[in-house]
Image (cartoon, rainbow, N blue to C red):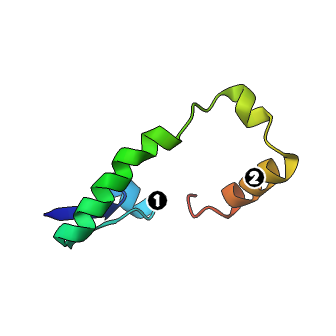
Amino acid sequence: MVASVGSATWDVRSYRLNFETSVPIIDRVYARRLKESCEEDPKESGQVTRESLERRPLRTRGWKSVARLLSPIP
């Protein structure tokens, strides 16, 4: 069994601008754990709305803006 960890976007723009990549891992136990983890994610997630984003603390919104400025995308 093979697992792929990383970005699933395989196009030239993503490689050059977004620094995306993936690595295949050939390990049955790891692949099974990764699959189980991915199946659990939707159970722990929630809907993101404009209102929920606007209710985030100012500090959180500020750090997101700083991170966007430091992003390697031109």
Query: Disc 2 vs disc 1: Cβ atoms closer than 8 Å?
Result: no
How dense is the environment of label 2, judged by Cα within 10 Å: few (below 14), some, or many (20 and up)? few
x and y, in percent, of residue 36 in the image: 32, 53
Choose between 63 and 18: the one closer to the eye. 63
Percent across and percent down for residue 25 are: 23, 71
Q: How many marks?
A: 2
Tell which of 70 and 8 is nearer to you: 8
Sort mark 1 into few (<14), some (14-19) or many (20+) by Cα contacts within 10 Å: few
Image check: 59 left or right of 42?
A: right
Which element is circle 1 on? helix
In the displayed orientation, state which residue is furthest to the right.
58
Q: Residue at x 24, y 60 (%)?
A: 32
Q: Amino acid under label 2?
A: Ser
- In this view, 25 is above or below 63: below
Point out residue 12 in the picture as x, y percentages from the top left corner: 32, 56
Q: Amino acid at mark 1?
A: Leu
Residue at image position (78%, 48%) is: 61
- Quadrant of res 72: bottom right
Residue 70 in view in this figure: yes
Secondary structure of the residue carrying tag 2 is helix
| Image mark for residue 65 | 2
Q: Which residue is mark 1?
A: 17
Can residue 10 be seen in the rendering of this structure? no
Please state if 34 lies on the left or on the right of 46 as rendered. Answer: left
Q: Quadrant of the N terminus?
A: bottom left
Tell me: 61 left or right of 32: right
Image quarter hosting the C terminus: bottom right
What label sits on residue 31 in the rendered view?
A: none
